[in-house]
Structures are given as C-alpha cells and as structure tokens.
Amino acid sequence: MIEKYYQRELSHLRELAVEFSKTHPALAPMLTGSGADPDVERLLEGSAFLSGMINQKLDDEFPEIVHGLVQLVFPHYLRPIPSTTIVKFTPKPSLMESIRVPAGAQIGSIPVSGTSCIFSTTYDVDLHPLSITDVELVKSAGTSGSLIINLELSGLPLEEWDNSSLRFHLTGDSASASMRYKFLFNYIREIQISGEDGSLCVLGKSNFKAVGFEDDEALLPYPSQSFPGYRILQEYFILPEKFLFFEITGLDNWRNRGSNGKFKIVLELEKVPQTFDRFTKDDLCLFATPAINLFKRDAEPVILDHKRPEYQVRPSGDSGGDYQVYSVDNVVGYVQGTVEEKPYKPFHMFNPQAGEMPVYTVHHRRSPVRDKTDIFVSVAYPAQGEEPVTETLSMALTCTNGTLPEKLRYGDINKPTGTSPELASFENIRQPTSPVQPPLGRNLLWRLLSHLYLNYLSVADMESLRAMVKLYIFTDTRDRSSVVANTKRVEAISGMEVSEGDRLVRGLVMRGREIKMSLSCDGFANSGDLYLFSSVMNRFFSGYASVNCFTRLTVEDTLNKEIYKWTAMIGNRPLL
C-alpha cells in the first residue's frame, strides 16, 4: 500500500524544508516556523504523494514483464482468492420430492455496509425430504465397531425414492471433524443399508467416496492450462473443510426397500480406537456445499480511443468500491456509429494460424489506495489489419465483494436470490474466510523462477517438495493464523523416499512410483489434520506423475508411529 511511501516522503520533505530554511532563511522564510504558509504544506503533501507512487513503482521492480510471463504460464497465480465458506441447505416441509440445486447457484448475505455479499455454490446438492434422526457409534468385541446413521424420508415411501447416492458433511470444529474424517476413511470395511420392513443391501469399501478432489468439484475456477494439482493445494490452504465430506454410492443397488420411510446406514469399521468414543447426530449433516464469493457482473463500458496503452476495468454500479474484479471473461468491441461487433480473444488463446483476430491482455496491479487488486486491459491487432478506430468495449466479468465478507458471521449468508432454491432455507455453517490478494509484489519474479525451476525437479526431494507446496501459501491476508498453521504443516514434512515399482494392470505391466512421506504430527492440530493433508498430497502426487505412470503413497506419522496407505492412483483414477 502507498501509505508507508507517502509518510516516508512527507517526513523526508519536511526535514529537508527545515534544514533548507535554516540554511537559507532569506530564500525560504515561508517553509517552516511560525510564519509557515499553509499552502506550502499542501504542496508538500501533493509532492509526497507523487514521489511515493514513483518509489513504490521502483520497488516493484517493473513487474509488467514478469506478470506477462506468469499470465501465460501460471495464470491462476495472479488471481485474488475470494472469501469462502460452507453452506447448509435445509429442505422445507413442503418439499415432497427430490430436487437438485446445481453448482453455481447464488445465495446472498445480510447487508454489509449496505451491500449484500453474493456467494456461489460449488457442488451439486441433491435435496431430498430426508433428515438424520440419530447417529450412534457402537463398539464390538475386540477392536471393531460400527457407525449407525438413522434417517427418515418424509412425503414418499422408500420404494419410490429414486436416488443412487448420499453425501454427508462432517461438521463441528475443523480439528475434531478431521479426526472423524481419518477415522472413517482409514477404518471403513463395508456399508450396510436396510429399512424397517425391507431387505438388507451390502456395499463394499469402494462405495465410500472422498469428495472435493474432482475437476467438477473445484472451489476455485482454474484456467484450463493450469495443473489441477495446484488448485487442490490452494483450496486446501484456504478452506480445508471443503474436503470434509464423504459420499455413499450404489444406493440404486438397494432393492425391496420397503414402504416405511425409516432406514439406517451402518458403516462397519475394522477398528475403533479406544480414545475415539463420540460420534453424534451433531457431527454430520446432509445437503452441504462449499461456496465462494464470486458472481457475474458487467463492466462499465470503456471508450477505446487508442490514446492509452491500457484501460482500467471497473464493475458497473461500483460507486462504493464494494466489488473487485476476479477475471475478465469476455470482451466485445462495438464500432461507434455501426452495429458491428468485434470479438476479442484472450492473448493466451491466440493462434497466429487460426485467423487474423484482435486480442486482449489482462494486467493485474495492486491498488495504491485500497486493499485490492486493480485490473487493466490492453488490446492488440494483427500487423496487417486495418487502422484501429474508436470503439466501445463491453466486458463480462467475474467479481468478488473484496474484504466485505470478513464482517460476516455464522448464519449470515441466508438471503435468497433469483437462483437459490425456493423449497429450502440455507445458512453458512462456517465462518467466511478472509480474502487473499495474489503475490504481485517484488517477490513475484522469484516465485516464477522457483515455479519454473521446481517444475523440472523431482518432487521426490524433500526440500523441493516443501518449496513447491509453499508457493501456494499466499501471505497477503489478514488471517495470519492460517498462514502460520499452513506453513507449520509444510515444515512438518520430514522425509521423502521414492522408489520405482511395477504393477500388473489388466494383464499389462505398468511402471510407477512408490512414495513414502514422513510427517511429524507436532506440525498439525492432530493426527486427523495430518491425515487430511496427506490425502490432499496423495492427489497432488497422482496428478504430478508422468503419463501412464501410477503412484502409491504411504505416510508415516513419525511422532505417533502410525502408518497410512492409499490405493495406487493413475491420474485421478484409483487402480483397483
């Protein structure tokens, strides 16, 4: 921000004024002292502002070239990270059938400084007239046990309920919820589903699915040319609760369900630790989804008179500065005096052999007066094209509400919009996260070089892996505690071993990597937090591997001497 530059320049000018006035009292009698002219002070303030902006620019080390390279190679790295949360839907009594709330449905908050913050859901939510009536953890002889989830369907009998899966969210504080996540995914053996007057359906361990890792479950809209593994890392660091879901699939295999609306899902567990003795109805919920403070909005029209190299992009109707541009999605030029439309393509999509088309480039720059990123757009034309004429640029944007959501609390996101479901109420069950600004400052060049360098190194090296993962802990946020916690998690990586291996897949021998990662639990809230981080790293490794090469991750908790193993993966698919 420019404040420190302004204050530094103003202090420097005042000190120089005093010194010069003492040395040359006849030349500058009005600079200081009791006879100082107030207009001189105003001139000093104006000069300090201009000098401060110049010094800030010099300290930025002229990042335009670096920004251009990052925009082409890692475009996701220049985007701000909006506020995020978890939203729970509650079906109204009038809901008598299943309906889907598609990802992208918009929901509003209570007004903050006169503005309602708009959030968009990121998971499809299938709403049913269904409720959890009870949850019970039962310990059996030995170390095994079961988790019994009792549910009740209202308005229609089970035999008429057409549904193939159910998704649950682990609620409560993050540390406790992550322990339950580890407990379920580490010890699940089989699933049993039965109604009061129906038959029993037994499902395997493969029907117990993790949620949040697939491309259609993304929280952040990533550009197509960016590696999805980076997105998963970034989403984990800003909202780890996004992954605290599980889905039970295969319900369409349940026949003869019975006419009663009550049924139960029994999760048979290989082990129930002695220290784990509590799992209640309050620890689970249905119909939840992550949500992000993103929404569509048009930009104010820009008169493209070609007298400037770039033009600032401002959301329409943003008189109070409550909107921040997240991305420029579409640019169309209208030639004045005609109805001709001239579409512009983003520069990274420009192919010289695809035709003579004008292109636009987006530039990101920290605002000198506000805690946000300003967006500018510049255009370019084919070398052999006609002389550019004055146009009006119309732009479609994706925007955020900047820092406004920081003032929201639990339950404040509960206002309907034109796309929210009519047959369900909703509220946020997690505190909205603080938005994060991208690292546009003087360290961006080193981050770019680190990214390019580490891309060509094996992540098998512990220090290289730490450095790579730390690139996605953005520090320009008011939530300092999350930055510290995430840094401790990465520093807890205490060892990496990678060995080549072979695996027989459908009669063919496939090469792959056996990865053993050592983590120290004292860098995490608990062993559940460690397990969730390891699950995220498992998906990162699987996507980072070579084509047609599997990965299999084993994690050792060096403090508690526990070993966790994941199924071999090729890309996003497990090898069974």
Image: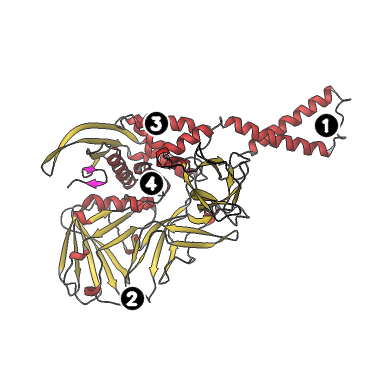
Tag in front: 3 or 2:
3
Mark 3 / mark 4, whichever is N-terminal: 4
Q: Is residue 222 left or right of residue 261?
A: right
Which residues make up the magenta segment? 566-576
Q: Which element type, helix, strand or loop, lies under badge 3? A: helix
The residues bearing labels 4 and 1 have C-alpha atoms spaced at a distance of 56 Å
Q: Which residue is mark 4?
A: 236
Task: Using the image, tell me which numbered label, if any, was put on residue 96.
Answer: 2
Residue 522 position in % (x across, y down): 35, 39
The residues bearing labels 3 and 4 have C-alpha atoms spaced at a distance of 22 Å
Badge 3 crowding class, 10 Å Cα cut-off, few under 14, some 14 to 19, many 20 or more, is few
In the image as oriented, which residue stretches furthest toward the left?
Answer: 507
Can residue 155 be seen here? The reply is yes
Within the magenta stretch, is there residue 482?
no
Q: Which element type, helix, strand or loop, lies under badge 2? A: loop
Q: Which residue is mark 3?
A: 452
Q: Which element type, helix, strand or loop, lies under badge 1? A: loop
Which of the 4 image quadrants contains residue 469? top left
The residues bearing labels 2 and 1 have C-alpha atoms spaced at a distance of 79 Å
Which of the pair 77/187 is nearer the observer? 77
Type of amino acid at the residue the image marks with label 1: Leu
